[in-house]
Image (tube, helix red, strand yellow):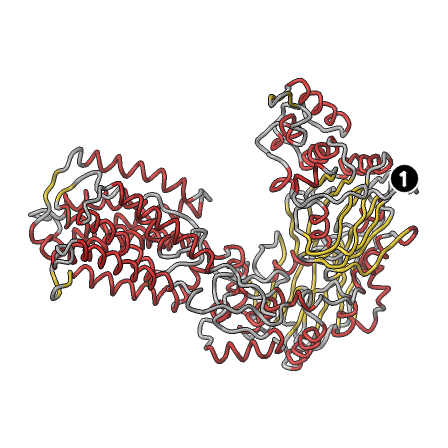
């Protein structure tokens, strides 16, 4: 606690608190986000926490929920000290409905609810949703979270937090996407929870909501707990003053005189995704500020002005001319844009200052398509001097600069194009005070020179010190315009807190999104691929009646089984959002090991030899998982290394094909159950079991959740690291099984056998409709993909087609399947 921010504590109830946060501190590098916070929440009480953006509210919530580990201090729930593990915190009785719902988009509504409570039945899940949702936001349990509207996603987030029957329930900005009926319904739910003895912490920027439901209010400012009182002892103005209560700590240039010349930028009734019906006119000498709680549409509006986000209606005119759609056209019209994320959208960190500055002026520094090194250097050095970039030379790599100097490089690049309109999103995000002053002066200089400058910032002090006029956004609309003496942090904060606007009904998407359950299911590709396989075999049989012999069908079934197992190994890793390049070489390595362990005189017996092979392959998978998770290495890098290493090891052990496998082992593996190969029956049973586990068991659901959205999975308490390691272990084990079966087919320790299974396994998985980025896939559909591939391979000789057609047909089918399944799974449009 800082010396100038001693908290005033409210009288405490007699009952013991359900939640105690004791001396919580948290820093991110040099930034102290929490400075010794002491806070208590009692059963049957609504405790509101208010504060500006950056006050520390989200950090405090994440520490309480086990998402973040405090640097110092303890979290106690119902008298027991909690560790910083989200799963344990939830089990102890604390649940959070996060501001940005921590949902797995590829899981259904029911599956997302069951992530919080595994034994939740469909009827119980429906009761939870009915308790939280109005009829307008009702949803089907089988709908995927990705297909929900924004408001429905928040309903699901609240319902999932409620599913674990919490003793402490934290609501983080829960009403942001709701219309008035949904807000009233939520307040009724909170009243019910309060009556049942639940301790409720309510985080909101909306002061009228806080005053309506809170029993106790705590004010956070710059990581300090400033004051806690019963809500009845506060007035709205007092809360605003406590939230703002800080001086302008930066040096701002004097505000200029607004010109009376022609309008530089005119916006009329502009609407787009996230905002609607915004009008604005900017004259020379004027800096316009866009303010509001995060996510209220101001950033979407700014990006629409830059031509990044498309408009749905309205006009944008620069010097009375309307730019054509597209970023390039807007830049040609004189619109420059500084994004808020300079690393992701602004700079190329691996390039030098000179090269980054030149990217914005390629035409100006080129002659007949050739870059002029002299002009590029002069441009960079001018920007370097004007903005006082602290770097030895313009040849310094941008990634080596401090955040403030990187921001100067980015702003300098946009200013160098001499824009008519300069749009700046968070001009000093992550920038030190000294660099801020340089940036503020440059922005004012641009305005004074006749450029229209529009700034979006979450820092009210920054908006106050820099801007001549401020538009305050709430729920997609401008609710307040501040000018003159009203442009101050207190008025901006007051406008944020007292905004009562509601989103347009079209944004709520009350009707939900409709789509066929079958066509969007993970099993749908299986049906299509089986039909295609039957078609391939039927056409081939019609052309060549020798194709569908018993031997041919048994061969297809056996080879399909081996490919399916290889593809299952790949699917484990793809489901978690990675790829395993070592599947093929690991299968080949298993074949080589089998030639030593499963010969005519197996050293440890057939069963023992097979178990040794499986243990070694599983250990390789475990090694992959540990390297990926512990060292944070990309899966593709780790498995590429073992791809080469395993091939080399196979060649060392068997420089040439050698080591015959025993007839007894091969005959056992090649046994028939009636007319069907035993291995095919085994793989069918394994497929059904794996499919059941993937969709009906907690570990399978957790694997899909981690692949769908890793950060959300961690926030709700799933042990992402263990899931990742288990995925690689499963991959190694299944590759080992595939290797044992392949060894029985080739009958000898060949060092190159199996290598081709890496690409074939990926192909089967993609054909089976798996989402290559993780979260979606099916063992059943992957088996069907393997069957389709093997049907084509088997058919080609009977059609007198060369092996080149194998690659053409399978490649073409993969391309078509990927495109088809992608289109089928696109989020459906709202139903009206």
Which quadrant, please, contains the N terminus? bottom right
Location of residue 679 (image quadrant): bottom left
Do we see residue 116 in this rendering?
no
Q: Nearer the viewer, residue 140 or 87?
A: 140
Farthest residue in the front direction?
543
In the image, taking residue 747 as reference, residue 734 lies left or right, namely: right
Foreground residue among 123 and 490: 123
Above or below, comparing residue 313 to residue 748 in the picture: below
Task: Looking at the picture, tell me which residue is in the foreground, 334 or 714.
Answer: 334
Q: Is residue 697 visible?
A: yes
Q: Is residue 49 left or right of residue 440?
A: left
Query: Quarter-wise, where is residue 44 in the image?
Result: bottom right
Residue at 45 percent across and 57 percent down: it is 775
* Kind of element beneath mark 1: loop
Q: Is residue 555 above or below residue 511?
A: above
Q: Mark 1 highlights which residue?
A: 254
- The percent position of residue 118, horizontal first and vertical second, equals 45, 71
| Figure label count | 1
User: Left or right: where does residue 534 sit relative to residue 763?
Assistant: left
- Neighbour class for label 1 at 10 Å: few (<14), some, many (≥20)? few
Query: Which of the image's four quarters has the C terminus?
Result: bottom right
Position in image of residue 740 (x %, y %)? 19, 51
Q: In percent of the image, x 62 and y 41: which residue is there? A: 345
Q: Is residue 687 above or below residue 132?
A: above
Left or right of 442? Residue 181 is left
Give the x, y percent position of residue 387: 76, 30
Q: Position of residue 126 (x, y in %)?
A: 52, 78
Question: Which corner quadrant of the image does residue 669 belong to?
Answer: bottom left
């Amino acid at each position: 606690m800082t010396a100038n921010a001693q908290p005033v504590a409210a009288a405490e109830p007699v009952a013991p608190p359900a939640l105690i946060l004791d001396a919580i501190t948290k820093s991110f590098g040099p930034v102290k986000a929490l400075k010794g916070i002491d806070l208590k929440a009692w059963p049957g009480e609504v405790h509101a926490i208010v504060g500006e953006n950056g006050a520390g509210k989200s950090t405090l919530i994440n520490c309480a929920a086990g998402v973040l580990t405090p640097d110092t201090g303890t979290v106690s729930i119902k008298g027991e000290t909690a560790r910083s593990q989200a799963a344990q915190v939830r089990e102890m009785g604390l649940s959070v409905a996060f501001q940005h719902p921590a949902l797995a988009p590829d899981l259904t509504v029911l599956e997302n609810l069951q992530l919080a409570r595994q034994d939740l039945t469909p009827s119980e899940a429906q009761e939870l949703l009915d308790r939280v949702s109005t009829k307008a936001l009702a949803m089907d349990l089988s709908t995927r979270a990705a297909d929900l509207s924004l408001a429905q996603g928040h309903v699901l987030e609240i319902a999932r937090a409620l599913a674990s029957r919490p003793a402490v329930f934290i609501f983080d900005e829960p009403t942001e996407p709701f219309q008035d009926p949904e807000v009233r319904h939520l307040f009724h739910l909170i009243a019910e929870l309060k009556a049942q003895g639940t301790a409720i912490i309510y985080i909101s920027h909306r002061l009228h909501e806080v005053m309506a439901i809170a029993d106790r209010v705590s004010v956070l400012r710059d990581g300090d707990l400033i004051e806690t009182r019963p809500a009845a002892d506060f007035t709205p103005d007092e809360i605003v003053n406590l939230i703002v209560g800080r001086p302008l700590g930066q040096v701002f240039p004097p505000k200029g005189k607004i010109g009376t010349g022609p309008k530089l930028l005119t916006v009329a009734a502009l609407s787009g995704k996230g905002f609607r019906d915004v009008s604005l006119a900017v004259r020379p000498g004027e800096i316009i500020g866009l303010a509001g709680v995060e996510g209220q549409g101001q950033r979407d509006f700014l990006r629409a002005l830059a031509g990044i986000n498309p408009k749905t209606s309205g006009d944008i005119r620069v010097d009375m001319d309307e730019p054509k759609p597209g970023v390039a056209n807007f830049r040609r019209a004189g619109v420059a844009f500084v994004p808020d994320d300079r690393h992701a959208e602004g700079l190329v960190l691996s390039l030098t200052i000179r090269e980054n500055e030149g990217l914005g002026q390629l035409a100006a520094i080129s002659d007949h398509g050739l870059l002029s090194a002299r002009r590029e250097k002069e441009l960079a050095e001018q920007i370097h001097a004007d903005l006082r970039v602290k770097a030895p030379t313009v040849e310094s790599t941008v990634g080596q600069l401090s955040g403030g100097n990187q921001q100067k490089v980015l702003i300098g690049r946009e200013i160098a194009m001499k824009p008519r309109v300069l749009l700046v999103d968070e001009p000093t995000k992550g920038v030190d005070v000294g660099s801020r002053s340089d940036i503020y002066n440059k922005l004012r200089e641009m305005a004074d020179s006749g450029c229209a400058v529009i700034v979006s910032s979450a820092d009210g002090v920054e908006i106050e010190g820099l801007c001549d006029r401020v538009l305050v956004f709430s729920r997609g609309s401008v609710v307040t315009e501040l000018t003159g003496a009203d442009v101050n942090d207190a008025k901006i904060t007051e406008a944020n807190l007292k905004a009562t606007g509601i989103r347009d009904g079209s944004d709520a998407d009350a009707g939900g999104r409709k789509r066929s359950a079958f066509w969007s299911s993970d099993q749908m590709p299986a049906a299509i691929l089986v039909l295609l396989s039957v078609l391939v075999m039927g056409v081939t049989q019609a052309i060549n009646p020798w194709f569908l012999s018993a031997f041919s069908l048994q061969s297809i079934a056996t080879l399909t089984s081996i490919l399916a197992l290889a593809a299952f190994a790949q699917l484990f890793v793809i489901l978690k959002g990675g790829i395993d390049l070592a599947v093929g070489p690991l299968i080949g390595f298993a074949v080589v090991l089998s030639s030593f362990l499963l010969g005519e005189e197996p050293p440890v017996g057939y069963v023992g030899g097979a178990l040794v092979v499986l243990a070694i392959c599983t250990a390789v998978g475990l090694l992959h998982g540990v390297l990926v998770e512990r060292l944070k290495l990309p899966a593709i890098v780790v498995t590429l290394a073992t791809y080469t290493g395993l091939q080399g090891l196979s060649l060392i052990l068997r420089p040439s094909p050698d080591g015959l496998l025993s007839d007894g082992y091969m005959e056992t593996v090649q046994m028939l159950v009636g007319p069907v190969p035993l291995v095919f029956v085994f793989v069918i049973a394994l497929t059904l079991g794996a499919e059941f586990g993937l969709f009906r068991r907690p570990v399978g659901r957790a694997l899909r959740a981690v692949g769908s959205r890793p950060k959300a999975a961690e926030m709700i308490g799933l042990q992402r690291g263990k899931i990742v390691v288990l995925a690689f272990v499963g991959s190694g084990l299944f590759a080992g099984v595939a290797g044992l079966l392949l060894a029985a087919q080739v009958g000898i320790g060949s060092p190159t056998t199996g290598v081709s299974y890496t690409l074939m396994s990926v192909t089967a998985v993609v054909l089976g409709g798996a989402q290559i980025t993780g979260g979606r896939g099916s063992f059943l559909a992957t088996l069907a993909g393997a069957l389709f591939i093997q049907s084509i391979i088997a058919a080609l000789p009977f059609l007198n087609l060369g092996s080149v057609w194998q690659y053409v047909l399978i490649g073409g089918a993969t391309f078509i399947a990927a495109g088809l399944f992608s289109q089928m799974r696109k989020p459906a449009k709202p139903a009206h």
